[in-house]
Image (cartoon, helix red, strand yellow):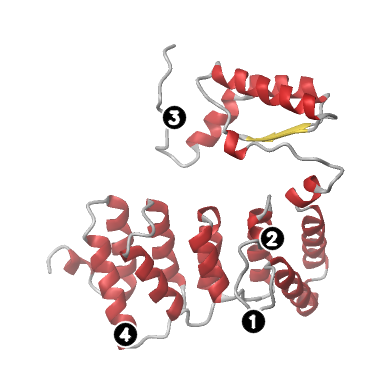
Amino acid sequence: MPRTEIGLPQIEIEAPRVLANAMLYELDKVAAHHSGGDYARFMDDIDVGVDTLQQAKKVIRDIDLTLQTRQLRLNSSKTKILNFENGEIERHFCIKENKFLDFVGTVLESKPKSNAHIKKALLGAYTIWRGAPLTSPLKKDSRFFLGNGGKIFKRLVIMSAHVELKLLERDLLDIIWLDPGLRQYSFNALTRLDKPNFAFYKLKGWFQQGDFVDDQAVVHMALFIVHARFRKDVKFDRQIRQFVGWCMSHNSMVYTYSGFLIASKYLGRVDKLLHP
């Protein structure tokens, strides 16, 4: 078939994942052969273990050639060759951090009354992983941004909800700004804060300045506004109305949906948006 520049369809959120999984079965055989079975893949996330640098390069070459038969290419910017001896693999896969979180998860399941101890332990880990004391800004070389650190952050957000540990508001805003892949979890954590008005005003400014242009971001924002516990005052009411108006000014079903979602909670009669 002629090569096309059109990628996998994005009509339904799970479609790319299912299609990617089906299209990569042949690749599994290639990678497993090179690695002697030391191979794992989840959807399009591939890890291959080999003994030498030369073998690693051959695996990458053959994976790319296999993908080309499907009119796909390997994303070189996301492809890494890691060395076990110098600790790169341990740091990339966050082995120590995952072991700690596995232990915390086991304790939460077996001893639900130990929440106070777990909360203290998670707070200590959070302080270390963010790369600075809680009184200092989040570091750009935080553990959350290195290797698979994003997955550590996701697990931390989920577990902190069980023990009512609230992450720092400024950290969550920084992560929303710096890492699109972690925005959903950061917004979820923001909803659990007490009166996150400052976060709403800050995010509203970013959206209206055009700093976020993807549809998913505005949906996350709308869900955050609907579920968070804000301090209600004249300023908040004015800012909510402004943001709803901004959403409705876009010629987009996603933005319109987000505007209606927010208005249904804060503006009373949604029909006024259509017939002011």
Give the residue pinned by disc 1.
135
Three-letter amino acid code of the residue under disc 2: Arg
Give the residue pinned by disc 4.
235
For the C terminus, the quadrant is bottom left
Give the residue pinned by disc 2.
143
Nearer to us: label 2 or label 3 = 2
Helix, strand or loop at mark 2: helix
Is residue 267 shown to the viewer in this render?
A: no
Three-letter amino acid code of the residue under disc 3: Gly
Is residue 101 shown to the viewer in this render?
A: yes
Decide which of tag 2 and tag 3 comes sooner along the chain. 3
Decide which of tag 2 and tag 1 comes sooner along the chain. 1
Question: Residue sitting at 26 percent across and 74 percent down?
Answer: 241
Give the residue pinned by disc 3.
7
> On screen, 43 above or below 87?
above
Helix, strand or loop at mark 3: loop
Dot 3, how many residues are within 10 Å of its Cα: few (below 14), some (14-19), or many (20+)? few
**Alpha carbon distance from label 1 to label 4:** 28 Å
The picture quadrant where one finds residue 61 is top right
Question: Residue sitting at 54 percent across and 75 percent down?
Answer: 169
Helix, strand or loop at mark 4: helix
The picture quadrant where one finds residue 100 is bottom right
**Alpha carbon distance from label 2 to label 3:** 32 Å
